[in-house]
Amino acid sequence: MGSTKIIIAGGSGFLGKSLAKWYSSNVEDCEIVILSRSPRAIDSTRTVVWDGLNPGDWAKELEGASALINLAGRSVNCRYNKANRRAIMDSRIDSTRILGQAINQCKNPPKVWLNSSTATIYKHTYGQAHDEKRGTIEATPEAKDSFSIEVAKAWEDEFEKAQTPDTRKLILRTAVVFHTDHGSAYAIMRRLTRFGLGGKMGDGRQYVSWIHIDDFCRAIDWLLSSAEAEGIVNISSPNPITNAELMANFRKVCGRPIGLPAYRWMLEIGAIFLRTETELIIKSRRVVPGRLLSDGFTFNFPEIQQALADLENG
Ligand SMILES: NC(=O)c1ccc[n+]([C@@H]2O[C@H](COP(=O)([O-])OP(=O)(O)OC[C@H]3O[C@@H](n4cnc5c(N)ncnc54)[C@H](OP(=O)(O)O)[C@@H]3O)[C@@H](O)[C@H]2O)c1
């Protein structure tokens, strides 16, 4: 066993695999254990089966662990029909609840518990950026975000309710994480751009909050190591940009001077065929990492140009 042991619930997904890889490259003597609903091999990690709902042998892994990171949850990239809404909500609430109960039963609980949330919790805005202190939480019909905000609030409430007095707790309000894995938001936008469809989406004025995967992993490690850090933390780059600017940058790195725009009505039709929701594109998310910046975290990729150049050529 390594001297640092990190448990990642839902760690078989995009972010969990990236974190596991980052730790194996950057931190010596670190054991990563993934809690997954199916036994599977993930490079340099050990997988322990759980169901995200009930107590079980998996809970023994938490005894004496350095940290628990909960990333479990049904993907939000789907149509918000009744069954999917239920799965999106329940997978987040149930996994958070059972992890809280498991920590509570530990003799030697994990030192810190990071639970995922989302930057989508903040109000749709073209105005001042939301940080942790001044950010407002409210749904906007134009952004079609009432369900997402309801989920995020319930998820955070469940986490707040957990009685874990000897474990430091942090809520991660994470923006869209840019990485090149197949199926990620980044990979989809790059593909559209290469096909000549890299124009603005909707009116292009909506803000996109984002973070490079390397900065995401570094920010998580920073929070694990900062003995005083507790509460809500925005995990995003300091420089959200508009969708029009983002797509212009994609066109530049993909060498496509022209990109057809996608008007709102096209997005609505496209979303039905692609089995997704337009909220993921049309909501204006202007979120900044107030706490990370004030606590002295430095971003390797604060600007979109640096981030895209690294992801394309790095
Ligand atoms: N990626 C982003 O840009 C981003 C941004 C903001 C917030 N987030 C949040 O961060 C978390 C991780 O994101 P991700 O991109 O890594 O997601 P992901 O690739 O979809 O992985 C999430 C993992 O959750 C587990 N899961 C799915 N349905 C579940 C259920 N019903 N019960 C228990 N576990 C279930 C799955 O693991 P098993 O199948 O192995 O059990 C899956 O690998 C999610 O909660 C997401 O909402 C992500």
Image (spheres, rainbow, N blue to C red):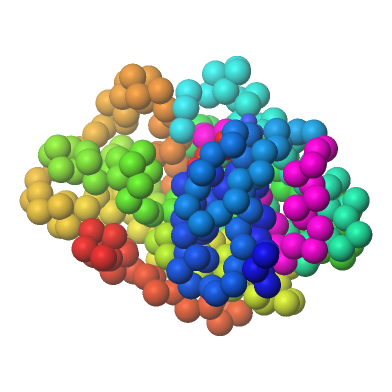
**Looking at the rendering, which quadrant does residue 306 occupy?**
bottom left
Q: In the displayed structure, does residue 248 sit left or right of residue 258?
A: right
Seen in the picture, residue 156 relative to 273 is either above or below; the reply is below
Q: Position of residue 277 (x, y in %)?
A: 44, 29
How many circles with numbers are drawn on the protein?
Answer: 0
Residue at horizontal 61 percent and vertical 46 percent from the top: 47
Q: In the displayed structure, does residue 164 sit left or right of residue 239?
A: right
Judged from this view, the residue extending furthest toward the bottom is 296
Residue at horizontal 74 percent and vertical 76 percent from the top: 228
- Quadrant occupied by the N terminus: bottom right
**Looking at the rendering, which quadrant does residue 91 occupy?**
top right
Residue at horizontal 82 percent and vertical 37 percent from the top: 55
Tell me where the magenta segment starts and ends, as one range. Answer: 55-76
Query: Which quarter of the frame holds ligand 1?
Result: top right
Q: Position of residue 9 (x, y in %)?
A: 65, 47
Q: Is residue 205 something that shows in the picture?
A: no
Q: Is residue 56 something that shows in the picture?
A: yes
Q: In the displayed structure, does residue 276 sit left or right of residue 191?
A: right
Q: In the displayed structure, does residue 59 sit left or right of residue 202?
A: right
Question: Any magenta on residue 61?
Answer: yes
- Quadrant occupied by the C terminus: bottom left
Seen in the picture, residue 273 relative to 88 is either above or below; the reply is above
Q: Nearer the viewer, residue 25 or 250?
A: 25
Residue at horizontal 37 percent and vertical 53 percent from the top: 179
**Looking at the rendering, which quadrant does residue 245 occupy?**
bottom left
